[in-house]
Image (tube, rainbow, N blue to C red):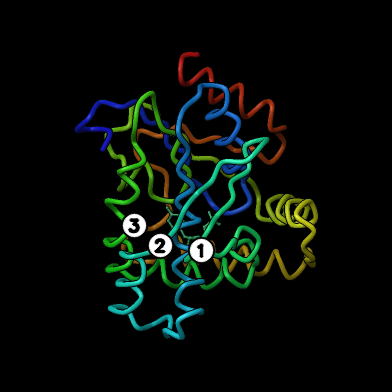
Amino acid sequence: MSQENNVPVLTIDGPGGAGKGTVCQLVAKKLGWHLLDSGALYRLTALAAEKHGVALDNEESVAVLAKHLDVQFLPQDEGLMQTILEGEDVSLDIRTEHIAGHASRVAALPAVREALLSRQRDFAQEPGLVADGRDMGTVVFTHAPCKIYLTASAEERAKRRLLQLKEKGLEGDVKQILSEIIQRDERDMSREVAPLRPAKDALVVESTNMSIEQVLDVVMTELGR
Ligand code: C5P
């Protein structure tokens, strides 16, 4: 954990589609730091539940799956990550809106969040970590020296999400994505454990009218680089 081993940690939290993933990949590459995509762990838990026929509201069983996730993250070119679950390449399967919705349901279960905590903290290794998620600055790495909360309007985030899906060869409808984004925001912000909100010491970046390069500049300046 950052507070125990003094590894520098940059946390970037915020709602889905705000561009956190892209910015985190770029910063990690620039600095040569490790990258934690914590959303992938919730998506993988949801996918594992589906594969094993475990109901999403069966908190105890979903938490057991989360604790024992057999997963490998294999870095690819251009900051992409190949994700292997139980020996199977699920890099695309975990990116659908269907799994995103299921991920936000399992993410509301306290035992699941607890089960994933130490796995996430283990990512903090020298020379540093860029942590992407919803509660990186508020729960997982509370002592991180640099925290960003990246957001944008729901409409802009839906557009960005659609573009991302298209780049991966996946289909999407902007109206449907928008309604799913609004539902997911509502669920992530209103849950009792680790609700989505900026840490008190986070810099809030409203990126609706900003390019990725501009966001990257703000983050690097905040990091003092
Ligand atoms: O970031 P991503 O869209 O991949 O996250 C999928 C879902 O996982 C989010 O909607 C949220 O419910 C959950 N999540 C979370 N805490 C995190 C990361 C993701 O609750 N740190």
On the image, which quarter does residue 131 sit in?
A: top left
The residue type indicated by label 3 comes to Ala
Cα–Cα gap, marks 3 and 2: 24 Å
Residue shown at 77% from the left, 62% from the top: 170
Q: Are marks 1 and 3 in contact (CB under 8 Å)?
A: no
Work out whether mark 1 precedes mark 3 in sequence or the reverse, and give the earlier one: 1
Q: From the image, which quarter does the N terminus lie in?
A: top left
Q: Mark 3 Cα within 10 Å, few/some/many (few <14, many 20+)?
A: some
Name the spot of residue 158 as percent of width and height, x first.
Answer: 71, 57
Instruction: Check disc 2 and give the amino acid type.
Output: Asp
Cα distance between the residues tagged 1 and 3: 31 Å
* Callout 3: CB less than 8 Å from ligand 1: yes
Circle 1 SS class: loop
* Residue position for label 2: 70
Residue 194 shows which numbered tag?
3
Q: Is residue 126 left or right of residue 151?
A: left
Asked if labels 2 and 3 touch by Cβ distance under 8 angstroms, the answer is no
How far apart, in angstroms, are the residues tagged by discs 1 and 2?
Answer: 8 Å
Q: Nearer the viewer, mark 1 or mark 3?
A: 1
- Whole-percent x, y for residue 175 in the image: 77, 67
**Number of on-image labels:** 3
Residue 166 falls left or right of residue 202: right
Q: Position of residue 85 (x, y in %)?
A: 50, 63
Q: Which residue is mark 1?
A: 87
Q: Secondary structure at mark 2?
A: loop
Residue at 31%, 27% (x, y): give it. Answer: 7
Q: Is residue 123 above or below residue 89?
A: above
